Amino acid sequence: MAFLRSGWQKIATVFGSNNGGLLSRFLTSNIPSVNKPLIDTNQDIISTCNKLIEDKSSRNFAIVHLLASKDFSLIGRPVVQPGLVTVTATIISKGLAHTKIHFKKKRRKQFMRINFQRPQQTMLRINSVVINNTINEAPKNEF
């Protein structure tokens, strides 16, 4: 029991002092990008395959699944507490991805179709990851 208590105290001091090196994070937006978690750090560039991200200059990610460094890891079940972590990203460019070939063929029917698809793609740069509250505070969205 003392081992768990000392671990929680160490995490609370890292969160309180704001000097924890945030090496890797799993995050998704309100609209998941490529339906998988992403690993990223500050100033990393990620590309999402959705066209639903608006044309603003920056974007806040609301859903963070895991936050980790060499000192601690904060795992959400399924997401980290809302309002605890804020991830801000800048939209770099919007365009089309590489061409994907979709080939259809029916045996013995002389039927072949080749379709070319280019999904829309948005490039994002992670600006900052900010820890807003301490770990044992009550969430702000409670009534």
Image (cartoon, rainbow, N blue to C red):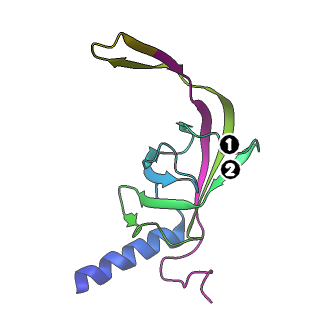
Query: Is the Cβ of the residue at disc 2 closer than 8 Å to that at disc 1?
Result: yes
Report which quarter residue 12 is drawn in: bottom left
* Residue found at x 57% / y 52%: 31
User: Under tag 2, what secondary structure?
Assistant: strand
* Residue found at x 23% / y 80%: 3
Question: Is 80 located above or below residue 105 in the figure?
Answer: below
Residue 90: give its label.
1
Give the left or right position of residue 13, taking residue 131 as reference. Answer: left
Give the left or right position of residue 127, taking residue 28 as reference. Answer: right
Question: Is 12 located above or below residue 128 in the figure?
Answer: below
Q: Where's residue 121, x and y in %?
A: 59, 32
Q: In the image, which residues are magenta?
A: 114-143
Give the left or right position of residue 60, taking residue 13 as reference. Answer: right
* Nearest the eye: 67 or 34: 34
* Residue found at x 27% / y 80%: 4
* Nearest the eye: 135 or 59: 59
Give the left or right position of residue 24, taking residue 138 as reference. Answer: left
Q: Where's residue 7, x and y in %?
A: 31, 75
Q: Which residue is mark 2?
A: 59
* Residue found at x 53% / y 38%: 44
